[in-house]
Amino acid sequence: MPGASKTYPQQAGAIRKNGYIVIKNRPCKVVEVSTSKTGKHGHAKCHFVAIDIFTAKKLEDIVPSSHNCDVPHVNRVDYQLIDISEDGFVSLLTENGNTKDDLRLPSDDGLLTQIKDGFAEGKDLVVTVMSSMGEEQICALKDIGPK
């Protein structure tokens, strides 16, 4: 969706645990929120601890609760796995019958092993691709049974 905005504003005080937030230009999932009371002239502040949804790095941010934060649009789409190339790229079947060949295998070892093993066994595999802020990554695997 070119031209679509990658994020939308949300008041810091309204962002909850398990929600999403942008920290240091990275889309993150919030794992902890704490709100601090402030001195007599200040604003309450929200302390966010969040995990980058693509790199799994932990990031933190402190924002006045009345200020807006950027919240990333996060999409998940399921695709059928057609092939795995030797250089680590996957070939996926889209809903309209085209192939999507620009995604690498996930960096998560557990998921990577499941995908490779299932594919080697000839199973029909469906992968879930999470996309946000112009990045995409395979984040889950569904096994729809033997061929």
Image (cartoon, helix red, strand yellow):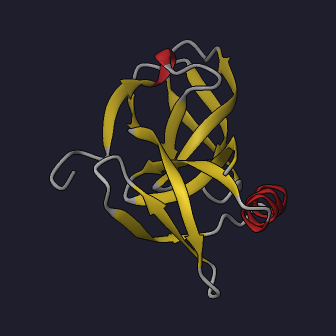
Q: Is residue 93 left or right of residue 114?
A: left
Q: Residue furthest bottom?
A: 87
Q: Nearer the viewer, residue 98 or 108?
A: 98
- Return the residue nearer the eye: 138 or 74: 138
Left or right of 110? Residue 50 is left
Q: Position of residue 58 (x, y in %)?
A: 72, 50
**In the rendered view, would you say 61 is above or below 108?**
above
Which residue lies at the image location 48% right of the left edge and 50% below the top edge? 79
Residue placed furthest toward the front? 147
Quick check: can you spot residue 128? Answer: yes
Find residue 87 and report its horizontal and vertical position in percent: 62, 87
The answer to whether residue 23 is seen in the rendering is: no
Q: Quadrant of residue 144?
A: top right
Nearer to us in this view, 26 or 73 = 73
Q: Report the side of 67 relative to 125 (left or right).
A: left
Task: Indicate the position of residue 128 as horizontal and vertical percent values.
Answer: 56, 45
Q: Quadrant of residue 45?
A: top right
Count of labels shown?
0
Q: Residue at x 23, y 45 (%)?
A: 5
- Residue at image location 77% in from the left, 55% down from the top: 111
Q: Position of residue 74 (x, y in %)?
A: 44, 39
Instruction: Tell me which residue sits at (45%, 50%) in the image.
Output: 131
